[in-house]
Amino acid sequence: MKNIIRTTRNLTLGGLLTGALALAWAGNLGAQTTTFEAQPGSKVKIEGTSSIHDWDMNGSIIGGKLEADAKFPEVGADKATASAVIPVRTLKSYAKKMDDVMQEAMAIATFPRIEYSLVSLKPKSNAGAKFEFDAVGALTVHGKTVTNTMPVTIEKVDGGKIKITGTTPLKMTDFGVPPPCPALAMGMIKTGDDIKVSIEWLVAPKAAAK
């Protein structure tokens, strides 16, 4: 009799464990993420000031990927992860001399890339197809990493792509970048420390391997 009771208990426990594992497996299937890869058409703009005029630099390459629920940004923002890269050499102004001065200040030979890693997305609001978040991320420039909070708008666009746009103020010296002071101007031209960075990042679901 004891053996029968023991066997029955073991079967019951085994069934419970099997059921729990099955539920966990099903839950994991539901939680699978989609990889969205960077696409052509992305934009980055850096705006600044100097003692003679305002200036800006523009780029069209933002590499990297986003991993989130297939229905992102409608759902799954709390579990989204992302990493992005901007090659410093792709940032161009109106004049090559200015590009050279900026690249020298950013020590491009040692630190050729600007890198960003998403820490969290904090929902703010949504208006129709556009969703607004505060993106908290680790931004690395000139070898120094600073945590930054940038308001972003995320929306789905043509072809299943997702467009992420945002603007944030920064200080060059926070990243150890000295505001450029062109030697040819004998120090007469001084660049302001404050800059504004705007991004428009396009990503799309990773194509299935053939």
Image (cartoon, rainbow, N blue to C red):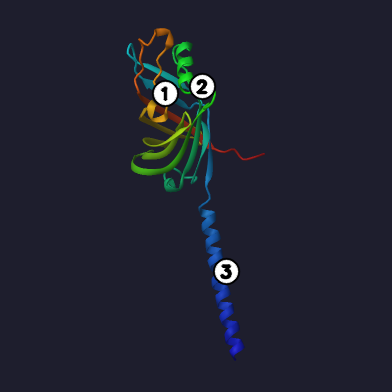
Give the mark nearer the N terminus: 3 vs 1.
3
Task: Please determine whether, in this image, residue 3 is positioned above or below residue 109.
Answer: below
Residue 18: assigned label = 3
Q: Secondary structure at mark 2?
A: helix
Question: Going by the image, does 152 lie left or right of 20?
Answer: left
Considering the image in quadrants, where does the N terminus appear?
bottom right
Of marks 2 and 3, which one's residue comes earlier in the chain?
3
Does the rendering let one see residue 156? no
From this viewpoint, is residue 68 visible? yes
Q: Secondary structure at mark 1?
A: strand
- Mark 2 or 3, closer to the camera: 2
Is there CB contact under 8 Å for labels 3 and 1? Answer: no
In the rendering, at what x and y percent does residue 87 appear? 52, 26
- How far apart are the alpha carbons under marks 2 and 1? 11 Å
| Mark-to-mark CA distance, 3 and 1 | 55 Å
Query: Do labels 2 and 1 touch, CB within 8 Å?
Result: no
Q: Secondary structure at mark 3?
A: helix
Q: Residues within 10 Å of mark 1 (few under 14, many from 20)?
A: some
Residue that label 2 marks: 90
**Where does the image place residue 55, in percent across and percent down from the top left?**
38, 16
Q: From this view, report whether residue 50 is shown above or below residue 37.
A: above
